[in-house]
Image (tube, rainbow, N blue to C red):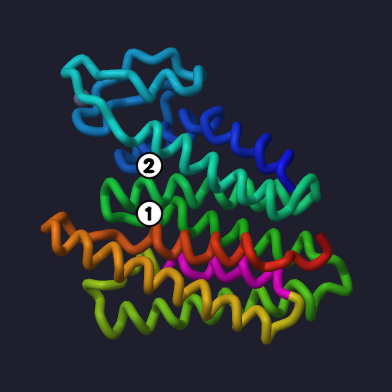
């Protein structure tokens, strides 16, 4: 649906500064403060905090400019737009906007620090369980709850085994992120078989896109590529093309 998608896209730049503060403070494990910092040297940016887009052009006192703020704002905007497009003005839009905001923050931290932090992966998992168990209708076991649990379980088992078999390729953070992706993806499936099907496809999209970008990065001798953003990509692509049950 174009209108909800456009409106939700605007939430990206609006909420971007808030997401940026979460990224900064989560890595340094300090209380969130209402201003943005330079990702390179941690100095305060001369930006009036809640004003969107100003951060794209800001330089810290040492003159650093960062790709992070435009990428966070636009990346989150694209994720929110996908949620708006998929769910329209239905009540399911809100939980998916919150979920996608978490995914945006986790992706930025993973790209910058090669870390998926427990303070994001575990709350996202609990939020996913809450959404699936509390917001499903009383007759939705076979349509919503069972496929979500199957998908979450399958995601977890796949990435857990990948981590056991090849720890340098798949970190524990990826294992902790995996089940929440499955919950939010499987919840949209009409039955458990479909839940398993879209989960396998999402994992395949993640592996293929990760492998392609990994090879390109290796050719240009860039540092190791974190896998979290590709897991997010696979899940979001499949959420966008799965016809949600009941919407
Ligand atoms: Zn700086």
Q: Quadrant of residue 197?
A: bottom right
Quarter containing the C terminus = bottom right
Instruction: Tell me if the residue at label 1 has its CB under 8 Å from ligand 1.
Output: no
Q: Residue at x 54, y 44 (%)?
A: 78
User: What x and y, as percent, mark residue 179?
Assistant: 52, 70
Taking the image as shown, residue 212 lies to the left or right of residue 198, namely left
Report the front residue among 195 and 140: 195
Q: Residue furthest right?
A: 139
Looking at the image, in which quadrant does ligand 1 appear?
A: top left
Q: Residues within 10 Å of mark 1 (few under 14, many from 20)?
A: some
In this view, 155 is above or below 12: below
> What is the number of the mark on residue 26?
2
> What is the number of the mark on residue 92?
none
CA separation in Å, label 2 and label 1:
8 Å
Which segment did they paint magenta? 175-189
User: What x and y, as percent, mark residue 74?
Assistant: 47, 37
Taking the image as shown, residue 192 lies to the left or right of residue 169, namely right
Circles 2 and 1, Cβ within 8 Å, touching? The answer is: yes
Q: Residue at x 74, y 81 (%)?
A: 191
Circle 2 — which element? helix
User: What x and y, as percent, mark residue 199?
Assistant: 56, 76
Q: Quadrant of residue 114?
A: bottom left
> What is the number of the mark on residue 117?
1
Q: Residue at x 32, y 19 (%)?
A: 58
Q: Residue at x 46, y 58 (%)?
A: 121
User: What x and y, as percent, mark residue 203?
Assistant: 47, 74
In this view, 215 is above or below 32: below
- Residue 238, magenta (yes or no): no
Q: Does the magenta stretch mainly form a helix, a strand or a loop?
A: helix
In this view, 242 is above or below 63: below
> How many marks on residues?
2
Q: Residue furthest front?
A: 2
């Amino acid at each position: 649906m174009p209108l909800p998608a456009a409106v939700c896209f605007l939430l990206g730049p609006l909420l971007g500064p808030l997401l940026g503060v979460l990224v900064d403070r989560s890595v340094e494990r300090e209380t969130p403060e209402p201003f943005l910092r330079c990702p390179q040297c941690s100095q305060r940016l001369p930006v009036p905090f809640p004003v969107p887009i100003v951060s794209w052009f800001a330089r810290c006192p040492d003159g650093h400019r960062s790709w992070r703020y435009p990428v966070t704002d636009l990346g989150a905007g694209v994720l929110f737009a996908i949620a708006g497009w998929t769910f329209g003005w239905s009540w399911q839009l809100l939980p998916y906007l919150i979920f996608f905001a978490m995914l945006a923050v986790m992706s930025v931290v993973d790209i910058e620090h090669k870390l998926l932090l427990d303070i994001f992966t575990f709350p996202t998992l609990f939020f996913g369980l809450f959404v699936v168990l509390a917001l499903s209708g009383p007759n939705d076991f076979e349509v919503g709850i069972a496929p979500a649990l199957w998908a979450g379980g399958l995601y977890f088992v796949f990435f857990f085994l990948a981590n056991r078999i090849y720890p340098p390729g798949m970190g524990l953070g990826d294992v902790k992120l995996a089940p929440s992706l499955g919950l939010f993806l499987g919840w949209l499936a009409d039955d458990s078989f479909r839940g398993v099907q879209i989960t396998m496809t999402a994992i395949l999209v993640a592996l293929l896109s990760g492998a392609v970008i990994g090879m390109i990065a290796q050719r240009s001798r860039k540092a190791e590529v974190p896998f979290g953003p590709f897991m997010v990509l696979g899940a979001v692509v499949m959420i966008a093309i799965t016809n949600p049950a009941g919407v």
